[in-house]
Amino acid sequence: MKCILAFTAIAALAAGACNKDVKVKSQTDISTVNACSKFDADVIIDGVSGLGAINIDSVKEITGQLVIQNMYDLQTVSLGALTSAGSLKILNNTNVYKVDVPQLNSVDDFQIIVNPNLKELTYRNISSTNNFQIISTHVTTLGAFTDSNPGNIEILSNTELKALDFSSVKETKGYINIANNGKGANVTFSSLTQVGGNASFADAATLDISKLSAVSDDFSLYTNTFKNLSLPAFATAEKSITLNDNAFQAISFPKLEEIGSSLNVVNNTNFKSITKQTFPKLSTIPGSIVLMGSFDNITFPALKTVDGQVNLSGKGKLSCDEAEKALSAADNIDCSLETVEDSSDEDSDESDGESDHKSTHTSSGAAHTTVVTVVGAIALVAACF
């Protein structure tokens, strides 16, 4: 067998097969690629029927791209010697359950996307990459990731994945997108200081981004289940900040002074108060503010400039009058808060019936209107007959 491989390798080199693109149509084409220790071209394996396993275990380096996609009979992929690749893409292979790349450490573009039955993904240590994506799999663990300055990182919809450890990452040149992984997922970016694109984290039970200081695009947190968000180093958001549908009870951005676009705090049901500790230094918002939720009070002690419209809605103890005072830096406020009385007040007024107060303000400068609806008196009159 060794002799056959040796003769194949000699023939491949003589024919220049190691630097020509290969579009695999059969096992013979795979054998031709396997004859090279270094492959200076692209290898495309797309929609070939009848291949249950792909074993390319002799190639150590592929300077082009290796693409394995739309292989509906494929179950296993073995790239046993591969240490580096320009691009490794394993896409849309519905029956693949195992991908083994045990020596891989450098890959410019790493994409493992829509392999819904993939449970075993083995790679030793990704120490250099420009794009790292694992999307729509059933993998339960990730290999080591030690690139301190990668490009993009995107880990999405891996419903069995509960530990995402990127603690070696200090800065990214591109975006980070983490969402819809395993229930109770623990996400660690404990050394991260700067993100070169947008940063979005969702569906995490724990999230460590405690050293994050700057995001060059949008910064978003969605549907996370941890209770306290504290970002002691966060100072720069080039575009918007969005906090949507999280379980937060407390939020703290002690160093944030300016947002490049808008601030959106929406439907965080357990978050009742924007206190002096929430945004103590925030002074400038050139875009809009959207506050939607069960707010009891809001405070922006340093806010001086809001260029866009402010939209407030929800049901809590906060009234539109109070909200407008807290946001006096804004010229355009649209408020439709529904004010709920304290339970102590309701008890003292029980003999007078129940009353609900809904205030709707549209403010441009000092102008506003207030609508108060009282239904308790009607109930009292009806009770006399």
Image (cartoon, rainbow, N blue to C red):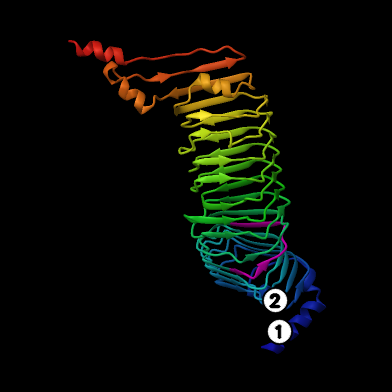
Looking at the image, how many numbered discs can be counted on the residues?
2
Q: Residue furthest left?
A: 385
Occupied quadrant, residue 47: bottom right
Which residue is nearer to you in this view: 368 or 60? 368
Looking at the rendering, in which quadrant would you find the N terminus?
A: bottom right
Label disc, if present, on residue 5 of the rendered structure: 1
Which x, y percent locates residue 103?
A: 67, 73
Secondary structure type for disc 1: helix
Q: Is residue 129 magenta?
A: yes
Q: Is residue 95 left or right of residue 174?
A: left
Q: Is residue 235 magenta?
A: no
Residue drawn at 59 percent across, 41 percent down: 252
Q: N-terminal of the two: label 1 or label 2?
A: 1
Q: Is residue 24 above or below residue 313?
A: below
Main SS type for the magenta part?
strand
The boundaries of the magenta stretch are: 122-134
CA distance separating discs 1 and 2: 9 Å
Residue drawn at 62 percent across, 45 percent down: 231
Which x, y percent locates residue 61?
A: 74, 71
Q: Is residue 225 above or below residue 364?
A: below
Mark 1 touching mark 2, by CB under 8 A? yes
**Classed neighbour count for the residue bearing mark 1: other residues with Cα under 10 Å, few (<14), some (14–19), many (≥20):** some
Residue corresponding to mark 2: 34
Looking at the rendering, in which quadrant would you find the C terminus?
A: top left
